[in-house]
Image (cartoon, helix red, strand yellow):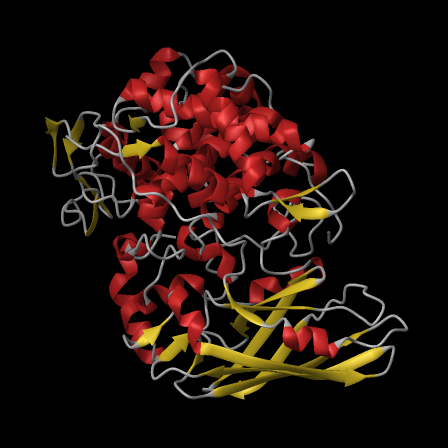
Amino acid sequence: MKIYNFNYFWLALLAICGLLPGISNDAAAASCLTGTVNFSGSAWYASGTVTVTNSCSTNVALTGQSISFTAQDSKGNAVSVGTLNDWWVNNAAYTLTFSGGATQSGTFGTTTSGATPVINAGQTLTFSGGFNLNNSAFNNALAASSLTFGSSTPTPTPTPTPGGSSITTGSVGFHLLLGVNGYTSAQDSITLTGDNYTDLIMSNFIAGVMYGHLLQKYTPGIQFDKDYLYGSIMGQLLQENLATEYYKASSNLIDPSPDQAAVMGMGQGGPYQINNYAADMVYGSYKPQGNSLINYVAVQKNIGFTMADAATQYTQNTPASFNNKYYGPILTAYFHFNDYVALQKVGPVGGYTPGWEPYFDKALTNFKTLPNNFLDVLLNVAYNQGYYGTLMTSYSKLGANASAATVANVNLYSSVWGVNDTYQQYPYQVRYYLDQLYDNPIPSPANQNTVTTPANHVAFSIATLESVFSNVFQTLGYVNGSKQYVFISDAQARTAFNSALSSAGVASTSTLDLSTASQRAQIFSILEAAISNLESSLGTDFTATTLNQL
């Protein structure tokens, strides 16, 4: 989805829906919220309400807010609360959907098309419903005493301010079409100077390296252009999101402004616009059969809906966790990895030969001996135009017999220069934004014969990178040695990262510049090793899937 063509449409829609400035939805808004839990019934069924009250003088957007409490029966067994409803309030039907184990975490949504859940100043919302029990009454006193509001993810470690000898400077422009009259000026930009965006860039590159790790786990020996594949999650955010420049480092939200709320609507997929996040990409259904995002063990714990609800999730608003700056990028990495797997499985499972085969499989075999190839382009057209678009087939055919000369031709911006087709432009838009970050020579968007070299610097303080790495992986789950499904801990993530630092001979007080090729390679090497270390130490496989609710 090309957000940059729809800025004025979205703003109009937000005005219609009443989502105007004056509504708070940042992390501090949680302090405005109080509530109650009141369930009673038999040993087999309990019903009741959860209330939410806004004690502040401003309205609070509930997208991005969460509510949690300990849900146990009188024997200490975990209880699943499910979905509660406030059937009609503020001209919409609101939902409060709980997931998790003994600690049930709830996120707010709405079943009314185009609406976003908001609680007005001084207002109380009442969500009602019920749930089954197993011959033991619900412990309401424990639930009521443990009620809290805030983030749906583990509390992240405060991120240090980047430091060291390098200083972050410059800017990156985005939302443009290369060589297309009327669209060559960047509609948006982020100012790198001041480090407001540095931790967001870090989390996106950590996700990008994880993306590569997943591909290489699934296809040992596969090669790709690391600069473009590892950076593709960041490039996607700039192109697909609505006004990434609104991001504030003080918040855990990628999109903190009410003016960006449209990306969290029904079927939108959040800031990265992963629209088909609820679909099984092999079987073509909304019931998870092994190739839905919720099937991946690592991301299921924080995805914001359950296996029981998965088949109808496409009718709901995008879960709040998709907007978290630590979880959103790595979830998107899994989305693309799922595409990669699905492209290879659709034909055999469906019993037919899709248009991109056998060329795609041949391209993957070829790419094992063709370094710095264009796998990123293939996967970006699969995401943007779709598997069955003409570009997936044409680039697969190119890849099947590609040589270094083929790669050189695909790499040229002249391949799409002046082509007023967003599907063809998309993989090159992503690369263009990355080339700005990397200080690679780039043509002027208006004149490909005018080539300039950006003078950007993005200082990655190793201490900051360690904190962000930990915060990212604390949003993921795994099954431990006791067969418990738990979040990765801060200590586990930091131990893996520091082991990678030691192996690389890089001091924890160092600063590396993402915009300098040699230092960028060091950053990638550290993250590659840290992810492998973590996976090994946990005794898990980050590509693992399940058909069960863990």
Q: Is residue 243 above or below residue 164?
A: below
Q: Nearer the viewer, residue 441 or 423?
A: 441
Q: Residue at x 34, y 63 (%)?
A: 260
Q: Position of residue 29 (x, y in %)?
A: 40, 71
Q: Is residue 472 above or below residue 244?
A: above
Q: Is residue 297 visible?
A: yes
Residue 297: quadrant of the picture: top right
Work out which residue is located at the far right of the displayed protein and give it: 135
Q: Is residue 356 visible?
A: no
Residue 192: quadrant of the picture: top left
Q: Nearer the viewer, residue 283 or 209?
A: 209
Q: Nearer the viewer, residue 74 or 190?
A: 74
Q: Is residue 497 above or below residue 179?
A: above
Q: Is residue 247 above or below residue 192?
A: below
Q: Position of residue 166 (x, y in %)?
A: 22, 29
Q: Residue at x 49, y 11 (%)?
A: 369
Tell me: 152 left or right of 194: right
Q: Residue at x 34, y 12 (%)?
A: 405
Q: Position of residue 38 (x, y in %)?
A: 68, 84
Disc tally is: 0
Tell me: 295 left or right of 330: right
Q: Position of residue 82 (x, y in %)?
A: 69, 70
